[in-house]
Image: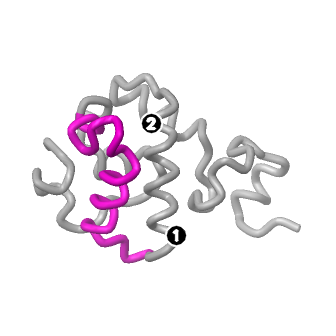
Amino acid sequence: MPQTMHDILHPGNSETDGRFGNAPAGWTMHDAVMIAEKEDLRLNEDHWRVIRVVQSVYAEDQKMPIRMLHDALEAHFQKRGGLRYLFSILPGGPIVQGCRLAGLVPPQGATDVSFGTVC
């Protein structure tokens, strides 16, 4: 049975393939690809991992504190260089750009450079 209006309008849309269990209603991988194209990004597996982490943190706490996102991303990508690495693959900032790709609104105050954006 359809759960959301998106489910009604797009029956059988299984683009997320279960890999994005915490995705917001109506979000699809295609949405992220379209946003990435507009921002001159070519998504690779690490971009998808960022999206999963951001969606997971948001699912735990919808207030989505910046520090929680910052720490989760830093920990998840520690072996690759943490936030320094993430800035190299998400030049718009791992939190702000990661939230956009994940179909989420960046948390208030996320435009502060120290929390993950260069905007």
In the current view of this chain or complex, which residue is farthest to the front?
A: 79
Residue at left offset 51%, top offset 39%: 48
Q: Position of residue 92 (x, y in %)?
A: 24, 38
In the rendered view, tell whether residue 106 sits above or below residue 113.
Answer: below
Label ID, residue 59? 1
The magenta-colored residue range is: 62-87
Residue at left offset 43%, top offset 45%: 50
* Most foreground residue, 116 or 1: 116
Classify mark 1: helix, strand or loop.
helix
Instruction: Report whether 114 appears left or right of 13.
Output: left
Q: CA separation, marks 2 and 1?
A: 18 Å
Q: Quadrant of the N terminus?
A: bottom right
In the rendered view, tell whether residue 52 sits above or below residue 58.
Answer: above
Instruction: Report whether 60 appears left or right of 119.
Output: right
Q: Are marks 2 and 1 in contact (CB under 8 Å)?
A: no
Q: Is residue 32 magenta?
A: no
Residues packed near mark 2 inside 10 Å, few (<14), some (14 to 19) or many (20 plus): many
Q: Position of residue 79 (x, y in %)?
A: 35, 40
Q: Position of residue 104 (x, y in %)?
A: 43, 58
Residue at left offset 23%, top offset 68%: 108
Q: Quadrant of residue 77?
A: top left
In the rendered view, tell whether residue 90 sits above or below residue 9.
Answer: above
| Kind of residue indicated by mark 1 | Ala
In the current view of this chain or complex, which residue is farthest to the right?
A: 1
Q: Quadrant of the C terminus?
A: top left
Q: How many marks?
A: 2
